[in-house]
């Protein structure tokens, strides 16, 4: 590493020692953060890659660049029985991370003051690695990706991300302004924050830098200033640059973490009625090109947030959308672990008893009360497809329109369509027989 890179990393370390990140209160627990817990549950990414449900018991998870440990707490909360190891090069951040996990009673955790490139010093391998809001600060992110790959088990998965240069372009302009003013020569503190605040407030509202970056509601939020206007080492990337880093690191792209929010077709008014050229060309484009086109058309994501792993380790499977009747007949249905909360179950039971529709969350479709009742056994254990079909026949023995007895074929089709929708939203996980 050259002197300039070493000096930059030292500046970044000093910034996080002076203002450990994130500044989330010690007592805060991720209760109710269902969607974030869902993404931090390693079951989600493993299923996405292999269409298999894994047991998190005794798995080992690395939080690389753990900061003050809130994501470590989330990883521990989301992955029952797993061990969480956190590393960070900021000693002050590690101190807070240890206090946070101790406060919440997690004992199967450990923390080390360690740079990512020195991961092999831990002398262990990991089933899952979380590297959140880190790579874009490093002079050479490929070195960090290769270091994580070297301690990743063969079937393991890495979650990492880069800042989007397209989404954050205005903040990068702002950072150049404040570098010109000398506010980032040393570790920014209260004085530098005050100067930024007063500078932005002094600008007319129609000045484009202020229009696109300033938020009056956050003018007292020091962390927001540090992580946007005065962020040492902050650098943006594009999708092609992300894929290039993965290729150089010999890592295989699996998926964007918020993959549903990167669906190119959602950008068009009528996805089924595209102009001829688009209708013919888009289906033939690569995943990389589709994601790059999305960011060019609609750069709304701060992070290029992705999962990756060792090449050629995904288990072959037939997508649920292509299952034949025999696949469905042998299917095992699992409730996603993050849905298995007492609160969700109690709400479901209440709705079923009142014969009311059930909405698991704002992101999932509203379910008929009978379908909801049909899912209840999943809170206790996984179920075969056929057992759910039999339960449906008991819950609705007669067709409400024809008043004819509900046939097995009719029940099978109703349950199948319900599960297809729920699997698409990640609520249930469907495993076929090997």
Image: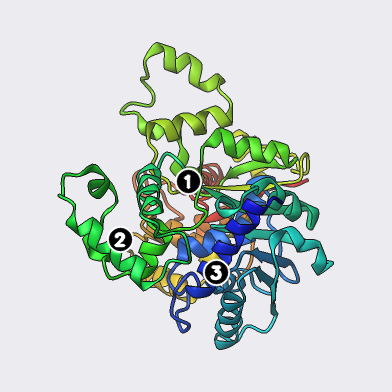
The location of residue 148, given as percent across then percent down, is 73, 55
The location of residue 409, given as percent across then percent down, is 55, 42
> What's the mark number on residue 14?
3
Q: Quadrant of residue 216?
A: bottom left
Residue 348 vs residue 167, the one in the foreground: 167
Circle 2 Cα neighbour tier, 10 Å, few/some/many (<14 / 14–19 / ≥20)? many
Tags 1 and 3 in contact by the CB under 8 Å rule?
no
Of the image marks 3 and 2, the number of the one nearer the N terminus: 3
Residue position marked by numbered label 1 in the rendering = 421
The quadrant in which the C terminus is found is top right
For residue 66, side relative to residue 250 (left or right): left
Q: CA distance from mark 2 to mark 1?
A: 48 Å
> What's the mark number on residue 196?
2
Look at the numbered disc 2 and give the secondary structure of its residue: helix
The location of residue 146, given as percent across then percent down, is 74, 49
For residue 134, side relative to residue 51 (left or right): left
Q: Is residue 54 visible?
A: yes
Q: Is residue 385 visible?
A: no
The location of residue 187, given as percent across then percent down, is 47, 67
Circle 1 Cα neighbour tier, 10 Å, few/some/many (<14 / 14–19 / ≥20)? some
Residue at 44%, 70% in the rendered image: 344
Which is in the foreground here, disc 2 or disc 1?
2
Of the image marks 1 and 3, the number of the one nearer the N terminus: 3
């Amino acid at each position: 590493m050259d002197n300039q890179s070493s000096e930059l990393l030292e500046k970044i370390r000093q910034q996080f020692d002076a203002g450990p990140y994130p500044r989330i209160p010690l007592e805060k627990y991720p209760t109710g953060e269902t969607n974030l817990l869902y993404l931090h549950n390693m079951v989600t990414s493993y299923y996405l890659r292999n269409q298999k449900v894994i047991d998190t018991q005794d798995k080992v998870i690395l939080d690389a660049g753990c900061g003050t440990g809130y994501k470590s707490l989330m990883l521990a909360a989301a992955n029952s029985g797993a061990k969480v190891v956190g590393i960070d090069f900021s000693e002050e951040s590690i101190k807070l991370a240890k206090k946070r996990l101790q406060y919440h009673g997690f004992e199967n955790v450990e923390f080390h003051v360690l740079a990512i490139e020195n991961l092999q010093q831990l002398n262990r391998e990991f089933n899952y690695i979380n590297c959140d809001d880190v790579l874009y600060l490093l002079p050479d992110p490929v070195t960090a990706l290769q270091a994580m790959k070297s301690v990743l088990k063969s079937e393991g998965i890495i979650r990492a991300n880069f800042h989007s240069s397209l989404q954050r372009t205005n903040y990068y302009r702002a950072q150049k302004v404040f570098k010109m003013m000398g506010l980032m020569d040393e570790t920014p503190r209260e004085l530098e924050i005050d100067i930024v605040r007063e500078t932005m407030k002094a600008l007319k509202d129609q000045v484009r830098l202020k229009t696109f970056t300033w938020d009056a509601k956050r003018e007292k939020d020091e962390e927001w200033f540090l992580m946007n206007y005065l962020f040492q080492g902050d650098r943006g990337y594009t999708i092609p640059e992300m894929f290039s880093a993965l290729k150089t690191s010999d890592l295989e792209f699996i998926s964007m973490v918020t993959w549903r929010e990167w669906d190119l077709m959602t950008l068009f008014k009528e996805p089924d009625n595209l102009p001829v050229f688009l209708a013919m060309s888009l289906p033939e484009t690569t995943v990389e090109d589709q994601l790059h086109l999305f960011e060019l058309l609609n750069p709304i994501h701060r992070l290029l947030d992705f999962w990756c792993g060792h090449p050629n380790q995904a288990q072959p499977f037939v997508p649920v959308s292509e299952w034949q009747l025999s696949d469905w007949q042998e299917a095992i249905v699992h409730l996603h672990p993050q849905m298995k909360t007492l609160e969700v179950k109690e709400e479901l039971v209440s709705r079923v008893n009142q014969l009311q529709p059930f909405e698991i969350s704002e992101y999932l479709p509203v379910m008929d009360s009978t379908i909801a009742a049909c899912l209840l056994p999943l809170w206790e254990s996984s179920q075969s497809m056929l057992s759910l079909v039999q339960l449906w026949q008991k819950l609705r023995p007669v067709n409400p329109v024809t008043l004819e007895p509900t046939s097995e074929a009719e029940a099978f089709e109703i349950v199948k369509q319900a599960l297809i929708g729920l699997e698409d939203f990640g609520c249930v996980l469907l495993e076929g027989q090997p």
